[in-house]
Image (cartoon, helix red, strand yellow):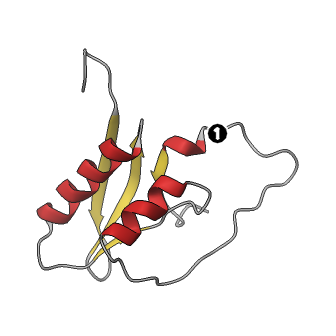
Amino acid sequence: MQDDQLKGFAIIRKADSGYKVCPLFADDETIAKELYKACLNSVMGEPLYLDIPEINQGAINIIKEFDAKYIFECARMYYGKAPNINTIKVFGITTFELG
C-alpha cells in the first residue's frame, strides 16, 4: 500500500507438491520482486511455483534473478479478440486450473 492505494498483491496456495503463487500482480517490477521474496520467505525449504506471462519482461527478470528452474510453458489462446488486460502488471498468472 502507498497513500491508501493498493500497489500489488500476491497469494500462495498449497499445491500437490510445494506451493504455488497465483496471482502476483504489481504496479512495477520492484514491488513484484518484494512480493515474490515475501512468498519465498513464507514457505522456506518448500518448492514455490510461479507461472509468469512471458510478455512481461519484469517477470522474466525476477525469475532470472532468483535463478528459478524452468518447468514448462503453455500458450495463451483466445476465441475472437483478446481481452484488454494491462499485462505489464501481471507477474504471475492466477491459475491454469480453471475450466
Count of numbered circles on the image: 1
Farthest residue in the right direction? 80
In the picture as drawn, the residue positioned furthest to the top comes out as: 3
Residue drawn at point x = 20 percent, y = 65 percent: 40
User: Mark 1 sits on what residue?
Assistant: 85
Please state which of residues 31 and 51 is positioned toward the viewer in this rendering.
31
Amino acid type at mark 1: Ile
For label 1, the SS is loop
- Horizontal side of residue 88 vs 4, given as left or right: right
Q: Is residue 34 above or below residue 47?
A: above
Dividing the picture into quarters, in which one does residue 38 lie?
bottom left
Q: Is residue 4 left or right of residue 69?
A: left
Report the side of 88 relative to 40 (left or right).
right
Question: Residue at 59% across / 77% down in the picture?
Answer: 73
The N terminus, quarter of image: top left
Q: Quadrant of residue 88?
A: top right
Dot 1 surroundings within 10 Å: few (below 14), some, or many (20 or more)? few
- Quadrant where the C terminus sits is bottom right
Question: Percent position (x, y) of residue 2?
Answer: 25, 22
Residue at 39 percent across and 83 percent down: it is 69
Is residue 7 positioned above or below 51 on the image?
above
From this viewpoint, is residue 93 visible?
no
Residue 70 place in picture, x, y as percent: 46, 82
Q: Where is residue 62? Give x, y as percent.
A: 37, 61
Residue at the location (59% across, 45% down)?
87
- Residue 4 seen in this snapshot: yes
